[in-house]
């Protein structure tokens, strides 16, 4: 058995050396992973998520630091309220998730603003490249610089790249990286193809794209309006238990009642259930997002 094991290891070593020299493969796997596996690393996903939230200048370390500060503050507040370490830790963990929730709201608002603005921007680009006779790069940048405040920094960076290199492909790459939006990807790719190879159907393509984005935006706005009452009621998941906890301080022994072993366990269970209900209801209310095809 030992001889067989040594032979297998030696054969695999020969395979690694041969494939490295002949095909340039690296790593200890039998073959490199296919690029179409669809898996994206965690760092890439976090970077993409923060870009969509408009946090291009915020590093992951700063994000973690803010969460840790809120964790410590939450532990202190929980200990002062309930008089125990376990409830304090539960409150601290709940408070540490506040930056994540805040940035999720900010990302949603930014994506919604971009979704509402792009149909009108596409129509403007269509008019400027047609009747006004503007070049495609000039029309895209002019329209973008007059667009919503959330999108302008990306267009400023793209304009700087265009002035320095006059390479529309690199300009579009900057826009796609900073906007991180499916509609922006489709629009930029359509304009890039028309700029590179020409074609007389750009007006029709942009008209179809604008109509499709307009229909998607109206559908999402209608869905959000129907969810308005449920989203308001969702806050009771946090407000009602917190109010009951504060009211408990004025009954009986007040804070001392929370310091028993059973009281500490029940408080932790209550905080866990509150967090679970908040996350579960948020998932139920989440609208499906369009996937980036050209990202």
Image (cartoon, rainbow, N blue to C red):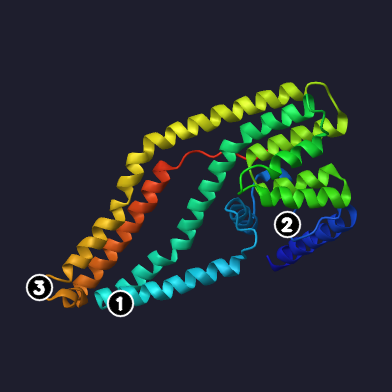
N-terminal of the pair, mark 3 or mark 1, is 1
Query: Do residues under tags 2 and 3 come within 8 Å of each other at their CB atoms?
Result: no
Q: Is residue 234 above or below residue 291?
A: below
N-terminal of the pair, mark 2 or mark 3, is 2
Residue depicted at x 33% and y 41%: 230
Q: Is mark 3 on a helix, strand or loop?
A: loop
Asked whether, in this view, residue 258 is left or right of residue 143, the answer is left
Task: Classify residue 181 by image quadrant.
Answer: top right
Q: How far apart are marks 3 and 1 (CA)?
A: 19 Å
**Place of residue 75 in the rendered image (x, y in percent of width and height, measured from the top left):** 36, 75
Asked whether, in this view, residue 252 is left or right of residue 108, the answer is left
Which residue matches tag 1? 79
Quarter of the N terminus within the rendering: bottom right
Disc 1 crowd rating (10 Å Cα; few below 14, some 14-19, many 20+) is many
Q: Distance between the residues labelled 2 and 1?
A: 50 Å
Q: Is residue 55 above or below residue 191?
A: below
């Amino acid at each position: 058995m030992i001889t067989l094991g040594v032979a297998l290891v030696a054969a695999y070593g020969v395979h690694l050396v041969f494939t490295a020299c002949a095909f340039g493969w690296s790593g200890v796997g039998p073959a490199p992973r296919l690029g179409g596996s669809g898996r994206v690393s965690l760092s890439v996903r976090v970077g993409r998520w923060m870009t969509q939230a408009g946090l291009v200048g915020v590093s992951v370390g700063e994000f973690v630091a803010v969460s840790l500060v809120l964790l410590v503050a939450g532990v202190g507040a929980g200990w002062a309220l309930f008089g125990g370490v376990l409830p304090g830790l539960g409150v601290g963990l709940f408070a540490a998730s506040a930056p994540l929730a805040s940035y999720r709201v900010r990302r949603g608002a930014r994506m919604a603003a971009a979704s509402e603005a792009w149909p009108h921007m596409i129509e403007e680009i269509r008019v400027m490249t047609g009747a006004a006779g503007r070049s495609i790069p000039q029309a895209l940048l002019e329209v973008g610089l007059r667009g919503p405040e959330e999108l302008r920094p990306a267009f400023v960076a793209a304009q700087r790249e265009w002035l320095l290199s006059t390479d529309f492909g690199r300009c579009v790459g900057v826009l796609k990286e900073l906007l991180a939006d499916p509609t922006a990807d489709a629009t930029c790719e359509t304009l890039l193809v028309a700029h590179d190879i020409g074609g007389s159907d750009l007006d029709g393509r942009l008209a179809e794209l604008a109509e499709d984005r307009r229909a998607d935006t109206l559908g999402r706005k209608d869905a959000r309006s129907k969810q308005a009452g449920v989203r308001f009621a969702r806050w009771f998941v946090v407000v009602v238990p917190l109010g009951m906890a504060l009211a408990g301080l004025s009954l009986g022994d007040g804070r001392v009642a929370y310091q028993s072993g059973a009281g500490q366990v029940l408080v932790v269970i209550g905080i866990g259930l509150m967090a679970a209900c908040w996350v579960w209801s948020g998932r139920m209310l989440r609208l499906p997002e369009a996937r980036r095809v050209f990202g």
